[in-house]
Amino acid sequence: MLEVKSLTVSIRNKNGKIYPLVKNLSYKLNEGETLAIVGESGCGKTMQAMAIMGLLPPNIHVTQGQILFNNKNILQLSPKERREINGKEIALVFQDALTALNPVITIRQHLLEVFKARTNLTLNEAENKIKELLEQVELPQSILSSYPHQISGGQRQRVMLALALTLNPKLLIADEPTTALDENTQEQILNLIKKLQKAYKMAVIFITHDLILAKEIADRIFVLYSGTKVEESLAKELFSNPLHPYTYGLFKSIITKDTPKGIPLFEIHGSPRGRSRFYGCPFKDRCKKSSRVCYKFVPSLEELRPRHYCACFWAKSIDSQRRQND
C-alpha cells in the first residue's frame, strides 16, 4: 500500500545552508498491517509523517526520494490531487489533540465541517453518520455540544480518531496518540485503534517513543535515530533480540512496576544533536562500542536474521555472541 523510498527531508537555515532531518529513509507498509516507528524526541518520526501528508513547514522540504501510495508517487501530485488523498485515503491523528482541535467551535461543528467540505451528504445524513462515529469511538452523544477544553484528554483523542475516520481512510497515521494520558486511558486508546483497524480494514503507522506501546499494537517496528533507520524487525523479534546498541539502550531504559527500587536507572549518555552526526555512524558519540570505523563510514542496513535488519558495524558480532549463548 505504501512505500517510502530513500526519503530525505531537509531544513534550510537563515544562512541558506541545508541540513537533513530525515536521511535516506525507506520502508514498506502492507494493507491491514501495523507498523510502529520508535525513537526519542527530535529523531524525525513526525517529520516523515508530515512529508507523507504534505504538511511540512515552509522552510522544510523533501530533497530526495519517493513516497508511493498504491504505486503513485504522491510527492508529484498537485495540491488539489493531494487534497483528494488526504482524509479519504490517508488520515492523520495529531499528537496534541487540544492544540489540533479548534477551541472556539463545538465537537459537533468539528465533525460536521468535514462532511460539508468533503462529501455530498445532507445535514440529516451527516448527523446520522456522526452518531455512528461516536458509537464506534465509544463517546456519548452529549459530547457534541462540548468545546475541546471541556472534555478530557482521552475524549479529545477519541474525537481525533472520529475525525480521522469520517472519510473511511485506508491508512491511519497515529502520531503519539497516547501522549500525556494516564496508563488506563492509554490502554483504552490502543484497544480502540485495534478495534477500528479491524472494522475499517486499515493499515496503521503508529508513531511513539514508548517501546511497550509499540509492542502491544505493532506487527513490525523500526527504530529511528537522528533521522536514520538503525533497526527494523517483527515486534516480537525486536523485543527478544535487539541488535543495535541504541535499541538495546532504549530497552534498558524502560521502567516498569517490576523495576527494583534503589538501583540506578540506565542512561544513554550524550545528546543526539551534534555536528558529528553528519558523518559516520549517527550514534557513534554515544555508543560504548564505537571505534575508528564508526567515525569514518556510515553502516548500511543489513539483514542479520530473517526480516531483522540492523545498521551497525558491531551487530554481527553481537548477534553471533547471543547465538552462542542461546
Image (tube, rainbow, N blue to C red):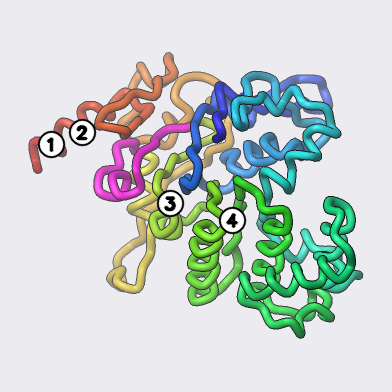
- Give the number of the disc on residue 176: 4
Amino acid at circle 1: Arg
What's the distance in space between the residues labelled 3 and 4, CA to CA? 13 Å
- Give the number of the disc on residue 319: 2
Q: Quadrant of the C terminus?
A: top left
Residue 176, horizontal then vertical, whole percent: 59, 56
Q: Tell which circle, 1 or 4, labels the residue nearer the N-terminal end.
A: 4
Q: Name the residue furthest bottom.
A: 142
What's the distance in space between the residues labelled 1 and 4, CA to CA? 35 Å
In the rendered view, tell whether residue 120 sits above or below residue 52.
below
Would you name the residue on which mark 1 appears? 323
In the rendered view, tell whether residue 42 sits above or below residue 197.
above
Residue shown at 16% from the left, 31% from the top = 320
- Give the number of the disc on residue 32: none
In the rendered view, tell whether residue 107 sits above or below residue 60.
below
Magenta stretch encompasses residue 4: no
Amino acid at circle 4: Glu
The part of the image, by quadrant, that contains residue 14 is: top right
Q: Secondary structure at mark 2?
A: helix
Q: Is there a contact, CB below 8 Å, between mark 1 and mark 2?
A: yes
What's the distance in space between the residues labelled 3 and 2, CA to CA? 23 Å
